Structures are given as structure tokens and as C-alpha cells.
Amino acid sequence: QVQLVESGGGLAQPGGSLRLSCAASGRVFSTYAMGWYRQVPGQERELVARVTRDDRTDVADSVKGRFTISRDSTANTMTVYLQMNSLKPEDTAVYYCNAVQYGAVEYWGQGTQVTVSS
């Protein structure tokens, strides 16, 4: 089992910045990748960015150059950060932390709301 605790999110103005954090604990030694997805009501959940244990990253074209994903690891924890700059109203969504283990078992955080509005 992996437990995911998200923090960050909230309200930002267009052009502003926010930082999301997601701390994983439990069987993190089996975690292959962590990342962030987002979902708008009525739409499918989409990948924003993810980072693997060997620091390979995937970033959605819609946020490339504006969002940066990074991670920290200890023996028992793994934390992933999403630095979101130059925010746009279309970035408004619920953002979900995701952890994928070897063997394709997935875990999800509870979600955190990001709202970009003036």
C-alpha cells in the first residue's frame, strides 16, 4: 500500500504561480513513477506531468515550458512537486497525484482544486 498526501493548490491570478506537493509513504520502494493528472467536470482525466524513479519526465504539451515536475526521495518516502508558472484560466481543474508501482498498481490522491481567475 502507498499513501499519498497532497498539498498546495488554491486560487491564483492569470500569470501567477502555484506549487503542488504530493508525499508518498508506505511501499514507496515499489514505486516506479509519480505524477500529476487533472480533470475538469465532464472531461476525462489527463496527464499533466510525471517523473520516474530514474528521473525521466513526461510533460503535457499544454503545460510544457510553464510547469516543472521534480521529486525528492528518502529510504521510506517519495515526494513529487509540480511548480506551475504562468498560469492560465484553462489550467483550472482538480489536480490528482498519482503513483504507479512496478506491476502497474496505481494509487491516487484525493485531489486538490486549482482555480486560475482574476
Image: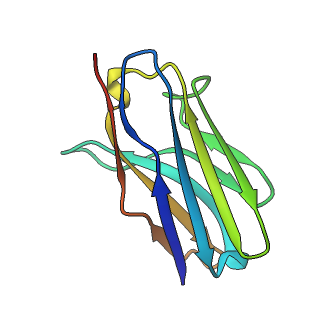
| Residue farthest toward the left in the current orientation of the protein | 42
Task: Name the residue rendered at 38%, 30% in the picture.
Answer: 91
Q: Position of residue 63 (x, y in %)?
A: 52, 29
| For residue 90, side relative to residue 28 (left or right) | left
Q: How is the image coloured?
A: rainbow
Q: Quadrant of the N terminus?
A: bottom right
Q: Position of residue 27 (x, y in %)?
A: 64, 82
Q: Position of residue 103 (x, y in %)?
A: 62, 79
Name the one closer to the observer, 21 or 35: 21
Name the image quarter holding residue 30: bottom right
Task: Name the residue rendered at 45%, 49% in the picture.
Answer: 37
Tally of marks: 0
Considering only vertical position in the picture, is 110 above or below 69?
Answer: below
Considering only vertical position in the picture, is 26 above or below 16?
Answer: below
Task: Name the residue rendered at 76%, 62% in the picture.
Answer: 73
Name the one closer to the observer, 66 or 104: 66
Q: Position of residue 14 (x, y in %)?
A: 38, 16
Considering only vertical position in the picture, is 66 above or below 30?
Answer: above
Q: Quadrant of the C terminus?
A: top left
| For residue 112, side relative to residue 35 (left or right) | left
Name the image quarter holding residue 85: top right
